[in-house]
Amino acid sequence: MDYFEIIAQVIGIFAMAFNILSYQQKTPGKVMAFQFCGASLFAVNFFMLGATVGGIMNIIAAVRALIFANPKKFRADHIAWLIGFIALYGVSYLLTFTCFDKEWNLFNGIIELLPVIAMTVSTVSYRLQNAKAIRLFGLIVSPSWLVYNIINVAIGAIICEVLSLGSIVIGLVRYDLKKEKING
């Protein structure tokens, strides 16, 4: 591993820390702020590692987090944002097999669809502006990214998703199940 790759991995570790800590935040705004930092760093990480599609998806994720961190300022509840982001994910998927020269076959078609599913589900959850929903939908998002990262041997991202899944479960227990027991 050369110095450039080591630097990329260090950036990925910082990105991982922000993403994992996002699930421990109590408010949707704080969750989104941490997600913004994580996505921005992961975009740099993926580009440095030559994973262009991962970089693009994380740029979109950073913009999305910024929008949903400031819901009143950007009118994040407007359906146009949801439609626009989902359209961007779809365009990114198509560009994977055209502009980025990824060979299309059934396997690649399915694997490259996983981040699109993850991004779509997370966008829906962020739009709900509910920290519990974000954590619950994370149980779909993280496994989708995890499979994609394993197939692409993205070690930092693999660790991030494994730890994110653990963090999601801890957040669900700390904030959601505990609250239900008190109220129920």
Image (cartoon, rainbow, N blue to C red):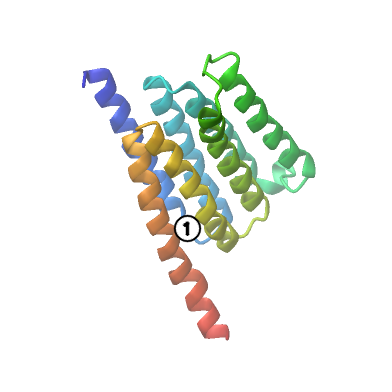
Name above or below for residue 182 compared with residue 147. Answer: below
65 vs 50, left or right, is: right
Name of the residue lying farthest toward the right: 79
Near-viewer residue (17 or 139): 139
Q: Amino acid at mark 1?
A: Gln
Identify the residue at image location x=55%, y=35%.
Answer: 110
Which residue is situated farthest in the front direction here? 106
What x and y, as percent, mark residue 109? 56, 30
Q: Quadrant of the C terminus?
A: bottom right
Q: Foreground residue, 68 or 93?
A: 93
Query: Is 64 above or below relative to 1?
Result: below
Answer few, some or many: residues within 10 Å of disc 1's Cα (few below 14, many 20 plus, some between 14 and 19): some
> What x and y, as percent, mark residue 73?
71, 43
Residue 62 vertical position relative to residue 24 in the rendered view, above or below = above
- Residue under the point 28% across and 32% down: 10
Image point 57% across, 52% down: which residue? 29
Name the residue: 53% across, 14% down: 101
Name the image quarter holding the N terminus: top left
Q: Quadrant of residue 85?
A: top right
Task: Give residue 158's position: percent from left, percent from top.
Answer: 36, 41
Could you tell me which secondary element the residue under label 1 belongs to? loop
Q: Badge 1 is on which residue? A: 25
Left or right of 142 on screen, residue 66: right
Q: Is 40 above or below relative to 104?
A: below
